[in-house]
Image (tube, rainbow, N blue to C red):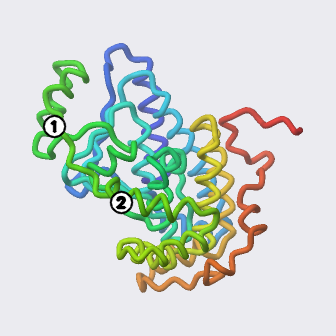
Amino acid sequence: LNHAMVRQIAAALAVWSGDDAVRAVVITGAGERGLCAGGDIVSIYHDAKDGGTGSREFWREEYILNAAIANYGKPYVAIMDGIVMGGGVGVSAHGSVRIVTERSMIGMPETGIGFVPDVGGTYLLARTPGELGTHIALTTARLSAGDAIACGFADHFIPSERIGQFLDALSTTTVQDALAQFTEPAPASELLAQQGWIDAAYSADSVTDIVARLRGSGIPEAEKAAEQVRSKSPTACAVTLKSLRRARQAGSLEEVLDDEFRVSVACLSSPDLVEGIRAQVVDKDRNPQWSPATIEEVDDAQVDAFFAPLGDLELGLTAPQKQH
């Protein structure tokens, strides 16, 4: 997902909003792999090394689009088949009709590249049952169809082999009638079944304490999760935890997007974003050298700085807060 695509989607939605001939909008992925593997992070890598202004303006328009999708006046049907990551979640999971299949693999992989969940992802993650969203964000866990529905990222399950027929039906019947005809019970969520140890560990107030609880639980899955968290950017994990706690208190998606924009812009000045993208998709050595290198070294004041207001550069989806 790149800047030009965001502009094309936003422009199309605006035109179709006022076109009485359009009853519903459907978003699908081109090709066989999935809906969308996320933002064009190689472009962000080069831009961040060059000052980051291009990425900032990309995120500005992308987050405005995420809010527009959430508030769209017509059914917005997202076919979340195959891979749906990061920015792909942003153009699907805020829609009014979100469909997953047995091929769905949904995730927010940001902490693995020194970034923080964005595109309204922290809003969705903060509203999952218990602390499932904290686990998903800090470990970059992948969600199956059943997980996605249990976590509020999707609504309906349709087998992938019937998606074509479902889309054909939309041209002759209403969205609700087509859903009634093609949806099936979703597979059970394996993640939901593990909520006990997840809630016990991830309710801690710091990433250090979360990892300690995971390691001390005696549960193999929890111990594996601890190692996954420790492999991510320590700074990104600490900022993500604070972002999720703030998103849980927020009154609207727009308020969360404003907060995420501040954090994303701050990430452009953090060494971990460039280093994380380098290690994952540029050099592909999968061996990022995070700075600081451990969660114990992350400073609270450094984390707080990611949330500083941006003045004239604010996203501004919500009215400026009055100073008390």
At horizontal 70% and vertical 39% (from top left) the residue drawn is: 316
Q: Secondary structure at mark 2?
A: helix
Q: Answer with mark 1 or mark 2, whichever residue precedes in sequence.
A: 1
In the foreground, 166 or 156: 156
| Crowd class of label 2 (few under 14; some 14 to 19; many from 20; radius 10 Å) | few
Determine which residue is flagged by label 1. Answer: 184
Q: Is residue 259 left or right of residue 37?
A: right
In the foreground, 208 or 171: 208
> Residue 192 at x, y = what percent?
34, 53
At horizontal 18% and vertical 25% (from top left) the residue drawn is: 180
In the foreground, 219 or 59: 219
Q: Residue furthest top?
A: 20
On residue 251, which mark appears?
A: none
> Residue 195 at x, y = what percent?
40, 56
> Residue 230 at x, y = what percent?
51, 78
* Kind of residue indicated by mark 2: Gln
What's the distance in space between the residues labelled 1 and 2, CA to CA? 24 Å
At horizontal 49% and vertical 44% (from top left) the residue drawn is: 127
Determine which residue is flagged by label 2. Answer: 194
As displayed, is residue 154 above or below residue 83?
above
Q: Is residue 47 left or right of residue 187?
A: right
In the foreground, 155 or 150: 150
| Crowd class of label 1 (few under 14; some 14 to 19; many from 20; radius 10 Å) | few
* Kind of residue indicated by mark 1: Glu
